[in-house]
Amino acid sequence: MAGIVSYGAYIPYYRMPRSVINVAWGRGGGRGERAVAGYDEDSISMSVSAGIDCLKGTDPKTVDAVYMATTTPPYLERQNSNIVATALDFRRDVRNTDFGNSLRAGVNALQAAVEAVAAGSLNKVLVTVADMRLGAPAGEHEQSFGDGAAAFLVGNEGVAVEIEGSYTYSDDLSDYWRRDGDTFISQWEDRFGRDEGYNKIPVEVVKGVLGKLNLTPKDITKACIFGANARAQAGIARAMGFTPEQVQDPLLDSVGNTGTALALMLLVAALEDATPGERSLLVSWGNGCDAVVLKATGEIEKIKDRRAIKRHLAVKGTLDNYGKYMQWRGLVPTPSRGGMRVSMSAEWRERQLGLPLYGVKCLNCGTVQLYMSGSSMRAHICLECQAKDNFEPYRFADKTGKTVSFSHDFLGGGINPPMTRAVIDFEGGGRGLFDMVDRDPEECKVGLPVEMTFRKVPLGVGSSSYFWKCKPVRE
């Protein structure tokens, strides 16, 4: 039976108190905080981070496809899921697909993956769901939106969560939308979307799926219900027949409304605590509604070591500067003194080394080395025994390391000064020079444990590329 084999999630390191937003606009109050993706993060990089969490202990070469869902794709004409697959070191013959245009895209991608595996056309599919939506400055959505991602590995062996059934309504009810070229989300009158849509349609869909499976609300341990605000979510949960204890924490006060990713991040949170035999209910929203009933198996106990939601929530840094947030989102001009530039043609030539971050291991003496220069990432001579072109590939992206030295550039530090660069000695050998992100300059020291993180780098006017940076290991 096809189902969920593993899960993962990603919440950006930075959280901005909503009071900071209110102060910037001369208002008081503001409950909770929202997750803010770094200046070098987007839906692709967050998908990779969630995918890394999900694939812990899984050989990436065994995965047959990536289904990436987002309403905020960095590229409208370039397959975003291809970049995710390359960074995660999947085979070249994987079948990648982008899902978008609706907040239900994540659940649509998950259902499509389950159906593809059940049909036998694919054996393992990684589903990543990420969003980084923008609300207009000083508006309600600027406070309520948050950034985040979830990931699920779908397969037919070692299934930890079975899909018992689903039910769908598709309606062209336009409560929120964003046209091509729009920067911010648009919204129709509040009561229309709430009273004619959100308060009615999910209740009908949940009733439909429970009736289809001969279940009652009491058979559900956790209901993972999309909600733009906690009050509205609590209201429809009651209308569905669920008690407050059955409703999964909506994450709205700690992370925010992560759009396409929200319902699936709630599912990850529910599965973190799930025991064999317990049922979860997944309820999406956006131009209709999907309701999916899932049941945990004994395999669920084997995947409790993910960072998922709890461990990401426990690690954070506070972004208390509204102006910096505006710069990070590109809403105000930012002075630039240049920086790293990546050639598209060079990226293609070194695609098997750059995005998956491969170095080499000497077949003669076993020495590993990471070679990076302006024109090539290929090493030809072993640093230890001087053997020539006698190597096998060696991946560094999944290795941790420790800083050997570091520097802070306050003058030319880019959009988030100071820019920190660190020389890293990797676990198992190898050394490299990388930008360090998600760090407090005061915590940097020689010997600091670090791990690799996939981030954006400038490519040129109107485009961007991706490479690996390092960040402190925080557990």
Image: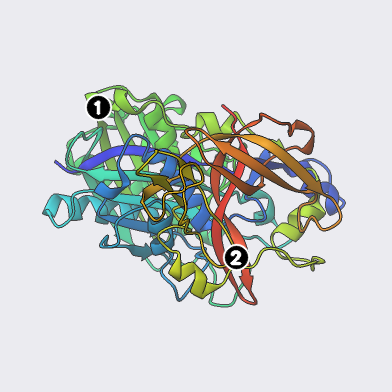
Between residues 227 and 159, which one lies in front from this camera angle? Answer: 159
Q: Which residue is mark 2?
A: 374
Question: Residue 379 location in percent, x, y?
Answer: 48, 56
Question: Residue 382 location in percent, x, y?
Answer: 47, 48
Examine the rendered structure and indicate whether residue 16 appears above or below residue 248. below
Between residues 421 and 49, which one lies in front from this camera angle? Answer: 421
Q: Residues within 10 Å of mark 1 (few under 14, many from 20)?
A: some
Numbered label attached to residue 235:
none
Tell me which amino acid carries mark 2.
Gly
Frontmost of labels 1 and 2 is 2
Tell me, yes or no, if residue 31 can be seen here. Answer: no
Numbered label attached to residue 299:
1
Real-space CA distance between mark 1 and mark 2, rounded to the nearest whole angstrom: 46 Å
Question: Residue 314 location in percent, x, y?
Answer: 59, 28
For image coordinates 27% across by 62% down, the residue present is: 95
SS of the residue under disc 2: loop
Examine the rendered structure and indicate whether residue 94 appears above or below residue 248. below
Quarter location, residue 40: bottom right
